Amino acid sequence: MSGAYAIHRRQSHEGGPDMTKVALSGADGQLGQFLRRCLLAQGIALRSAGLQPLEPLHPEEDLTHGDLRDPDVVDRLLQGVDVLIHMAGTSVERPLPEIVQNNLFALHEVYEGARRHRLKRVVFASSNHAVGMHKTNERLTLDCDYRPDGLYGLSKMWGEGLARLYWDKHGIESICVRIGSALERPTEFRHLSTWFGFEDLLRFINCCIKTPNVGFITAWGVSNNSRSYWTPTGCEALGYRPMQNSEEFASDIMRQQNPLDVVGQRYQGGSFAAFDYTPRDQRPRGC
């Protein structure tokens, strides 16, 4: 396969030629739908992919679909692409076989496809749940210990390791973004610490697309929240500086009852940490 790219030329919203071809997997998901609309509106040369066929949102939008465990589907997704924004996969706690298929096997196929097509960069949607068993009174830096709060978080820990492997051995850049609570606005107490506003999400993704050379980066996917669990909230290597702050919504949220139980309130992963949690009095003696 030739290493030359047939990159679709379009005019960027800044008026100059934009030579970057971007693929978006998981374009049918909540965040994928938002990013798809915004990136197309910005004039990004975008290939959108979902599990099932998508209806085009723009005459020049490039569409594909299928199961990413299939190398042929991955090849259709990545042919001629520079940057993949990988939002596909299981995004909630599910039984292990589903997690393994969608978040391990499929991700491995994606990185093998990136290797075949000499893809420059993958933006990997990791998760705060890779470190969700840290307590809420901790302030975490990016070099904190992995403490997954479930099988989903465990899969994201593995995904970050895979991304590191493919940078070190194959030169494929990766930005692993540990996404917090990506919502239009925060709605509950935990979100005051974990909110990733949509304006900041789009700002972050644009940095991921446009920054010339990144190597391997792990970053917090979070806004500039006064109560953030994670520091630094920005990412200097990408030029990402979040602007939104959940504190704007704090007075309304603080009047509401916290929906999390006592375990969910203790750990940063919230309800993910509380799910299938063995109480202290039911654990082996001495634990």
Image (spheres, rainbow, N blue to C red):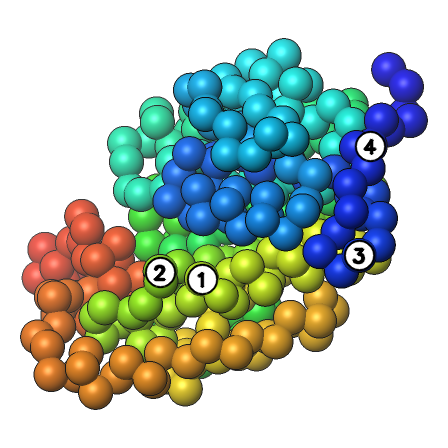
Viewer-proximal residue among 55 and 137: 55
Q: Work out which quarter of the rendered image holds the C terminus and state it.
A: bottom left
Query: Is tag 3's residue or tag 1's residue first in the polypeptide sequence?
Result: 3
Q: Which residue is mark 3?
A: 15
Which label belongs to residue 100? none
Would you call the spot at circle 1 few (<14 residues within 10 Å), some (14-19), or many (20 or more)?
Answer: some
Q: Position of residue 281 (x, y in %)?
A: 8, 62
Query: Is tag 2's residue or tag 1's residue first in the polypeptide sequence?
Result: 2
Alpha-carbon span between mark 2 and mark 1: 6 Å
- Rendered view: 224 above or below 149: below
Is residue 107 something one can see in this rendering? no
Q: Helix, strand, or loop for circle 3?
A: loop
Query: Is tag 4's residue or tag 3's residue first in the polypeptide sequence?
Result: 4
Q: Are marks 2 and 1 in contact (CB under 8 Å)?
A: yes
Q: Which residue is mark 1?
A: 198
Query: Is tag 3's residue or tag 2's residue first in the polypeptide sequence?
Result: 3
**Residue 55, quarter of the rendered image:** top left
**Residue 80, quarter of the rendered image:** top right
Q: Which residue is mark 4?
A: 7
Q: Are marks 4 and 3 in contact (CB under 8 Å)?
A: no
Q: Which residue is mark 2?
A: 183
Name the front one of labels 3 and 2. Answer: 3
Would you call the spot at circle 2 few (<14 residues within 10 Å), some (14-19), or many (20 or more)?
Answer: some
Is residue 252 something one can see in this rendering? yes
Residue type at numbered disc 2: Leu
Alpha-carbon span between mark 1 and mark 4: 28 Å
Would you call the spot at circle 3 few (<14 residues within 10 Å), some (14-19), or many (20 or more)?
Answer: few
Q: Helix, strand, or loop for circle 1?
A: helix
